[in-house]
Amino acid sequence: MREARALLAVAAAVLAVAAGGLLASPPPARSQAPDVLLNVMASGAKRLNIFIPDFTVVAGADPGALARRVPEVAGADLKFSALFSVVSDPAPLPVGDAEALRQRWSGAAAAGAHAALHGLLSLGATRATAEMRLYDLTSPELRLIATKKLDMPVADGRRLAHKIADEVVFQFTGEPGIADTRIAYVAGPPGAKELYLVDYDGAGPLPLTANRSVNLSPAWSPDSRSVAFTSYLGGYPFLYRLFAFERRPVQLLAGHLGINSSPAWSPDGRSVALTLSKDGNPEIYVLTVATGAFRRLTTHSGIDTEPSWSPTGREIAFTSDRAGPAQIFVMDAEGANVRRLTRGGFNTQPRWSPRGDTIVYTSRQGNHDLWAVSPDGSHARRLTAGPGDNESASWAPNGRHLAFHSSRLRGSRIFTMLADGSEQQPMPTQGGEATSPAWSPRLP
Amino acid sequence: MPQRRGHLVLVLPLLVLTLFLVGCPKRPATTAASAPPPTAPGPAATAPAPATAPSGSAAAAAGATRPAPAAPAPAAAATTRPAPAAPATPPRPVEFAETANLKDIHFEFDKYDIRPGDAKILDANAAWLKQAASNLVLIEGHCDERGTNEYNLALGERRAKATMNYLVSQGIQASRITIISYGEERPSCAEKNEGCWSKNRRAHFLVKAR
């Protein structure tokens, strides 16, 4: 319900722009994809129903069955977005015959589809090229509303599909989807936790570390190249960064006496907020990565940790026990103007939404559950309600989805949900009990 | 700015040390590269991460070969060693050994103050440390599994620090003591109940001959 409303807001914004144009001139002959979305939502549908027949191979051989697999994966991405419902169809499409093609679209429209996605695949020995075509099945002429060519290594069919799905979401909402993202997480038994990397949908898990110590708190740099993390690989808990997609050694970011923990990259990627105890007790500092200089932000005898930047980089939310049991506070990026955000219970792990309007945190009232609050402290609401502990939220780059870990099944696992707490579902992982997901930015 | 000075304090002894060690002017670059300031984000070689390039990245397309193996363990360790701050670089945790002479103390949930009963244990630990003056001590701060990993790292640090402060107040030299927080990462008891959790909320002691 809430999701439909959010979607309508997007569509309404598009309509407002369109209406401005309508005043001055007659209706344009060709409307854009967002209008399709608007009309569908206005008709009461919660999701746009998209028809996705198998893709058509126009050049080369298809031993990897990409014509079936790519639309299948893209369809799953579109379902996950919670903006679309998907009807697939394995029957071959008559691409060379305009009238036959038109009949297929008409049939799909009659069956309730609002849009259709088709792709023409050119498959070489190493590269796969997809020309995607998006149709508006709500228009009488079943018009083509967008085409785009995408190119990937032929071995990377899943990523090709994710790119196509993200383009479809972009066409309908004006913002790219998040299918071409990864999630880093921590997995392993106590005393032997390693970092892993997995596609956002749980496919292709890979180890990121294998140092046989304890590795914690992965945090992506905004350029999606590196992951900052705390590791005991040198004996003490120091802060490092690894380069997830490059053959580059792990780099030490902070190796002070005491803890070097809880990294959070500033939105501009130049700094890392972190917790150091080198000056006596856990305080929040900002490390300028290029110079190695540390700037101290908090000065309090209690625990100050778990910094999280606002998307503007002007404020930092953090956890402190300065007022009794841990609570969420906000300060500006220079450490001044500290204000308290939460009251009651035991509240930790603030995670500022990339949209800026929400801070998600972990609240202990018996078990741990995820809550959300506005940055002014109003509108606190519960997102999860057990069973087990639900902790450690990480925002998808579009601010619409969250990953978190939950012990509701046996052992801790990674889950995803929408920002309003709906659509909670487990994500496949490897390496044993999985915790501390970190959702990557969109990949280049 | 005090922070700035603190940073220099870390770096200067290292530079001095480097100057002493270099001696031979033929390899200044090599020496400098192998001993970057611990807190500087230079190319501090530790362990290479297994590369996980998405197919399509330059590395994968080029069929990148594995990088040269990381520097041998001792060299790698040297670059990750904490800064040689004022007294001395603390020994690595693995150099410390278990001892039956120092007893654990325990903490209330989410607390880091020393309870009266535990103060008596610390008094006995201090007494043993006084007569075993050749020993350095490592204090580990631990938490139970409840609460977030990051918060528990801070909480474990506070427990280890509170324990250290008590021992210092009993006349043990601070220079003999190193602390480390393991947060909730090294439980001594694995079950998910208060019986286990209360055992895990502890300060644990290890020793090393000076």
Image (tube, helix red, strand yellow):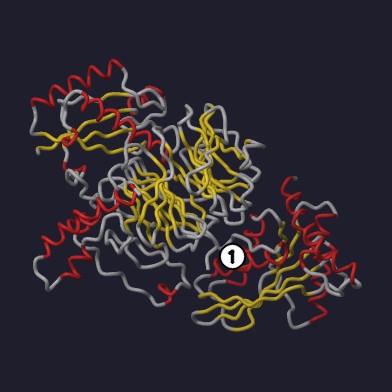
Picture coordinates of residue B197, whole percent (x, y): 38, 26
Residue at point 77%, 54% (across, down): A8
Residue at point 66%, 73% (across, down): A55
Q: Is residue B36 left or right of residue A138?
A: left
Binning the other alpha carbons within 10 Å of mark 1 as few (below 14), some (14 to 19) or many (20 upward) gives many
* Depth check, front residue: B153 or A277: A277
Quarter of the image where one finds residue B72: bottom left
Q: Quadrant of the N terminus of chain A?
A: top right
Q: Relative to A288, is B64 above or below? A: below
Picture coordinates of residue A27, whole percent (x, y): 89, 71
Q: Is residue A32 left or right of residue A200?
A: right
The answer for which chain carries disc 1 is A
Q: Relative to A150, is A239 above or below? A: above
Residue at point 50%, 49% (across, down): A333
Picture coordinates of residue A319, whole percent (x, y): 48, 38
Q: Which residue is mark 1?
A: A162
Give the residue type at disc 1: His
